[in-house]
Amino acid sequence: MRRPQSIKSRVLVGVLVFLVLLGVGFLSAVPPLVMGDMINQHVDFSTVYDAEEFGLTATELTLRTDDGYSISAFEVEANDPRAVIILISGIHNPSVTAFFGHARMFREHGYASVLYDMRAHGKSQGDVIALGHLETLDTQAVVDYIRSKDEYQGLPIIVYGLSMGGAVAINSIGQIPEISGLVSMSAYSSWEDVFQENMLAMGAPKLLAKIQAPFVKLYTLLKFGLKTSNIYPKKQIANLGERPALLMHSHDDSQVLYANFERILERAPGHVETWTRAGDNHLMSMDFLYPENDPEYAQRVLESLGRNFSL
């Protein structure tokens, strides 16, 4: 008499297990399906600027990372520099050469610059964008180059990034003790956070978006290695210590939501400076190519650098 009920129970358990496995399989498949085309590529920029367009002379460099990537960079020297600024751009655009206007502004105020394209961007090697998890190795190659030059001996090194470059800048200062200061614009707090927010923006149920986050983390760990598990901005900002930092974000940023800035700031040391703008200004400057045309932005950045890295 009990056998039919027992069979029914086993069938029910089997169906539930199948549905759970099916759900896990679906959730595991979403990150590679959504992210694959975004990160499994080499970014060839449609617009690349020449230093001469900005009245500069830049030395083109080819640097080597510890994991074997060739990284393209440009060095803009300054007379008797007070510091060297490493400039890093975003995930798909613009080319780091769009920072030549910044390099000119910085040179006029006594700062040398090294602008580099992350792996899988521009002339740098690579076919996978690592979302900030491995690009700290690219920054380390630039730091090693700066430290190798006699004229830069003893000078502070400042890392300055935009969007994904801002995330890489935060991760870099968290991982590289030789870096003396940080400026970050429109950085995301972690890739899982951005993924979850984009799902919500596309109308996905909140519970589904929340459940998806650990599967995004699992995918990035499998893609970039277990050693990268803690390499994300809201974790690495805590490693800043007493080094100066300026974090910037716009309140209505549609590409990286303002909540990312808030999450990073929650874990940042209390001395960190912040500057926010109204509206959707992902690039922060109203004239990114010629930042001196946006006095409010230029003044905010230069004053922060001057306070912390005066001669």
Image (tube, rainbow, N blue to C red):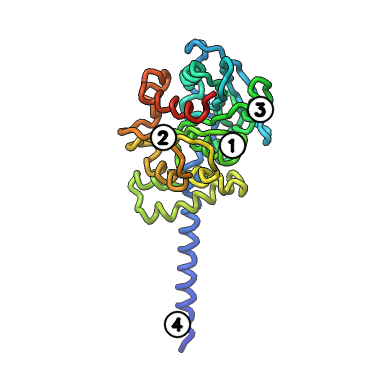
Q: Which mark is residue 33?
A: none
In this figure, what is the number of numbered marks? Answer: 4
- The answer to the question of whether label 3 and label 1 lie on touching residues, with beta carbons closer than 8 A, is no
Task: Tell me the mark number nearer the camera, choosing from 3 and 1.
Answer: 3
Residue closest to the far front: 311
Upstream in sequence: badge 4 or badge 2: 4
Q: Is residue 203 left or right of residue 53?
A: left
Question: In x, y percent, where is residue 147?
Answer: 66, 27
**Most foreground residue, 204 or 85:** 85
**Most foreground residue, 12 or 175:** 175
**Amino acid type of disc 1?**
Thr
**Amino acid type of disc 3?**
Arg
Task: Tell me the mark number nearer the camera, choosing from 4 and 2.
Answer: 2
**Most foreground residue, 166 or 272:** 272
Identify the residue at image location x=35%, y=50%.
Answer: 204
- The answer to the question of whether label 3 and label 2 lie on touching residues, with beta carbons closer than 8 A, is no
**Amino acid type of disc 4?**
Gln
Q: Which residue is mark 2?
A: 248
Question: In x, y percent, where is residue 253?
Answer: 35, 36
- The answer to the question of whether label 1 and label 2 lie on touching residues, with beta carbons closer than 8 A, is no
Distance Cα–Cα, label 1 vs label 4: 59 Å
Q: Dot 1: within a 10 Å radius of its alpha carbon, few (fewer than 14), some, or many (20 or more) residues?
A: many
Residue 135 seen in this snapshot: yes
Question: In x, y percent, where is residue 260?
Answer: 41, 43
Residue 48 seen in this snapshot: no
Kind of element beneath mark 1: helix
Task: Tell me the mark number nearer the camera, choosing from 3 and 4.
Answer: 3
- The answer to the question of whether label 1 and label 4 lie on touching residues, with beta carbons closer than 8 A, is no
Q: Which residue is mark 1?
A: 136
Identify the residue at image location x=67%, y=36%.
Answer: 67
Upstream in sequence: badge 1 or badge 4: 4
Image height of 214 relative to 186, above or below: below
